[in-house]
Image: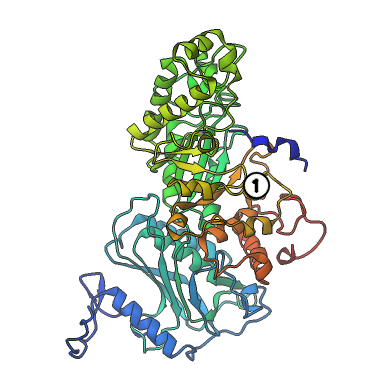
Amino acid sequence: MSARNKRNFWKCGSSCRNTPKVNDTHFLLRSPPKMSPKFPTPNIQSPRYFFTLLSILLHLTPIITSRTLPTIDSSSHLSDDSSITYLWPLPSEFTSGNQTLAVDPDLSLSLFGNGGNSVIITEAFERYRTIIFKHVGSSKFGGTRTLGYDISKLTVIVNSDDEELQLGVDESYTLLVAKNNGLSVLGEVTIEANTVYGALRGLETFSQLCGFDYGTKTVQIYKAPWFIKDKPRFVFRGLLLDTSRHYYPIDIIKQIIESMSYAKLNVLHWHIIDEQSFPLEVPAYPKLWKGAYTKWERYTVEDAYEIVNFAKMRGINVMAEIDVPGHAESWGTGYPDLWPSDSCKEPLDVSKNFTFEVLSGILEDMRQIFPFELFHLGGDEVNTDCWSKTPHVKQWLQETNMTAKDAYQYFVLRAQEIAISKNWTPVNWEETFNTFPGKLNPRTVVHNWLGPGVCPNVVELGFKCIYSNQGLWYLDHLDVLWNGFYDAEPLEGITDASQQKLVLGGEVCMWSETADPSNVQQTIWPRAAAAAERLWSSMEAAPRSNNSETALTRLQYFRCLLTRRGVQASPVTNRYARSPPDGPGSCYDQ
């Protein structure tokens, strides 16, 4: 896929701590008194029972007296303005108080529930401990805390042991942060989720509640107690990365995936191959990656596995794309018979069965690597003139009684059949829908990019849609400011509730004509985060920018959080994305 027709404007933690356990997964408590048969008797061994009880106690005693540390010359914006909630994206529901709690750098993890033994959670906990306590350590100059800590344990309850990561996996979670005052059954920090992936989202939110206080040299949580109940608005929250026009080493791709998890994005759309290069190893057809720029700019099967597994550990699916029949010139470098002719190299030769044999072989090999149910088949910007001008293709068109436009439809539908035969749901760019909507397989997911108003037409006919309006969500459009990304609405023009459910979500697109490892993160962030909140948070929680006085302030804070975590995010308020600051100033004011 190309950068589209936009080429022309590029310029442009306590008393319950040692409570005995039952069956290794439940806390022990005296049995409650018998209740009226009109009401169900609660299961007191269920973590959810205690979780609910604690939330009630928190609401009954919202401000609990506790020992807190004074804030001395704190540089954390978390304590500067009590009216602003510095969480990104904003949770669906939350309440907070006015306490400041100190977090023990030896924070421990306790796991409960059917999914309590998940490596995904234990590894994530270690990652977040590293992030949260980056500045904390012993110091010969003093300044370290000698009193006890308010928070010394994080409890994670995962109700299901199913770790399959597919579209629509439950990412909801509940997070409680409170000083254990001896009244509550649970204390300190508790995350409950139905799946490990919901727990991951809760860990990210918890990490954002933690701020380092430079005066006391401790990690503190402000505005406690917190009660957060959260879930995503859309099931598909994506970022496209184009590795054909510029090659990205796998460590760079991993950095991008890691940064996606901070904003709760959950799909990496890997646009691996295009007309410029074919960097992926395909064992069934080993000459295909001769189409790579060089022999050093390639991805082995093992590289691809590594990227997929790295992403899964962060709750992110990888949707692969091969764009056919256009944008495939690089295929012919290894197999010239895929070109209609030496002088006319794309679209792929529609007249030869060999073309579809290669396509089937690629999809068969890729199915072993990419478990996500969606596979992107492209289908955009197909100029069929080459077919009409190449003698043997022209003859085939005449023999099959097809026009070049008919052949475009034939190719797309045959490619869909191959993908579906390998248990994939096909995704196609919107040109396929615009050209032959009545012929597309009913399972097709239509990917909008050309402009507004497409998803309403798509869902009206019963298809599912992904929103990526290029005028608002194309990251290489450097003149689109943060609020353009923030204010875009995937459900624009769709009022019917059943049709709204057909919009899976959306994705921002990082086409790489003018981006490479030197500037890709600056181009992605922080504008991708603006779209991420639109895709995660409800419109009630996060209204459009002109109705929210705090969106910019919160995004500036999140941008600085990204930079503290090593992500090279550009200033929020630049006139053009990825440009440097105009002059000296605070990160929080740019």
Q: Does residue 354 sit above or below 306 in this rendering?
A: above
Vertical arrangement, residue 234 with respect to residue 304, above or below:
below
Of 364 and 419, which appears nearest the observer? 419
| Three-letter code, disc 1 | Leu
- Is residue 428 shown above or below 359? below
Residue 520, image x and y in percent? 64, 44
The residue shown at (52%, 47%) is: 457
Residue drawn where x is 65% and y is 73% of the image = 77
Label total for image: 1
Identify the secondary structure beneath mark 1: loop
Q: Going by the image, does 196 lie left or right of 389?
A: left
Residue behind mark 1 = 475
The foreground one among 228 and 102 is: 228
Percent x, y of residue 14: 38, 84
Q: Residue at x 56, y 75 (%)?
A: 218
Which quadrant would the N terminus be assigned to in this image? Answer: top right
